[in-house]
Amino acid sequence: MEDFVYFFSFQDPNVAMVVAGITLLSISAAMVGTFTFLDKKALLGDAISHAVLPGVCLAFMFAGSKNPYWIVLGAFITGAISTYAIEWISNSTKLKEDTVIAAVLSVFFGIGILLLTQLQQTGDAALSGLDHFLFGNAISIVYEDLMVYGILALLVIICILVFYKEFKLIIFNPSFAESVGLPVKRLKLLFNTLLVMAVVTGIQAIGVVLMAALLITPPAAARFWSNRLHVILMLAVLFAVLSGIAGAFISFAVPHMPTGPWVVMAISFIAFASFFFAGKKGILSKWYNQRNYQQKIHRDHILKSLFQALEKNSKTLEKDEIMEYFPGKEKLTRTYISKLEQENKIELEGEKLKLTPSGLVEAKRVVRLHRLWELYLAQYLNLAPDHVHDMAEKMEHLLTPELEAKLDASLDYPTQDPHHSKIPRDNDL
């Protein structure tokens, strides 16, 4: 608890620098990652994050120290080379892009591990902490690092905001972008450059191995909450910042704990929570909506059965007769009979069921929708009358009153369905 209070009180300037740095790089990574994710280029970010490792090692060999300027330059060069290599090989061969990405990632990361191993065997004291670039260590950020990585992250953020409309257009409709005169190739080159820069800004705090998670997981989680780009972008930034600060805090509170894995753990928790609990697209939400829909279907079919009995001059049906309509679902049917009785849609007379006035209105609507759909399918899709029942059974539960009115009007307010059954109206019976 003391660590928590101390960390978030920002009394220590080093802690303030860490929070500022992790916030900036999280925002830049989430913003670039959102466009990368929506453009279905998630693997490209992973390849770049692994490809910067040899650049880090070569920069150290050249500079002889962990100078952030040289580290950034080296990482940017090898990241850019990997991006160009992927594009060139994909365009020049028949290999699929995911195959090319996997090959380039493996080659660059393998070279990086060889160089890192070779450097570690030299016993140079200046190498202390170089392995942090694999899994990240946000607490090791100093003022000079903050200036370099922070300015890069800020530059990425500004460019995304300035070219927001252009990037949106080339991702969702590149053909239209070309037709209106946008320099699509240059914009793609700019975006790839920003992607490399976003990866480079996180190599010290998050690490080259896990940086791809901060790029892709936040927008993937945000996608479950909305279909609108600006909402996805804002949520992705929020998720990335929360997970970045959480990972930095754990690195601060637990000695020798790398930042990257805990950032991934935090963002994974947010992602799984989104996968399960998101409003309309979450797994539990879908299950709940599907369950309600199945319940509505069963409920409507009970009302429809009673109305069809009424059409045959039988105002009531025995419970056992209702059960015959739903073989194998006796228990469920009894449950919904009780619910319909509680809603005052049906009433019981001993073992007999009867529609109430409000139940009759609702039953008419269900039957009317079914028969309107049968007629529509027969007239407009030229389906045989004996082929339309099953399709109408599925569609009758989906129409809103507005769509019902349009469907009725388009059929010129018919009185019979393809089977010559009467289409009930509110003033009938």
Image (cartoon, rainbow, N blue to C red):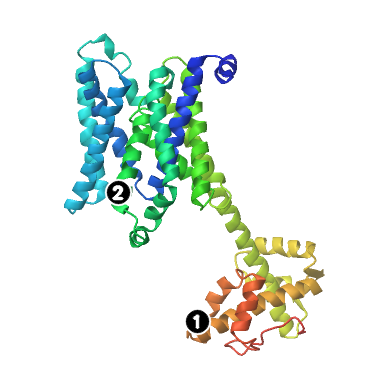
Q: Do the residues labelled 2 and 1 touch (CB within 8 Å)?
A: no
Image x and y of residue 25, in percent: 43, 31
Q: Is residue 277 above or below residue 338?
A: above
Q: Which amino acid type is marked by label 1?
A: His
Check disc 2 and report its element: helix, strand or loop. helix
Residue 367 falls in which quadrant of the image?
bottom right
| Residue nearer the viewer, 335 or 153 | 153
Q: In this view, does 302 lie above or below 274?
A: below
Residue 372 falls in which quadrant of the image?
bottom right
**Residue displayed at 44% across by 47% down:** 164
Locate residue 117 relative to residue 128 in the image: left or right. left
| Residue nearer the viewer, 298 or 125 | 125
Residue picked out by circle 2: 186
Question: Does residue 409 show up?
Answer: yes
Image x and y of residue 206, in percent: 39, 28
**Residue displayed at 34% across by 35% down:** 197
Check disc 1 and report its element: helix, strand or loop. helix
Residue picked out by circle 1: 387
Locate residue 266 relative to residue 49 in the image: left or right. right
Image x and y of residue 411, in percent: 59, 85
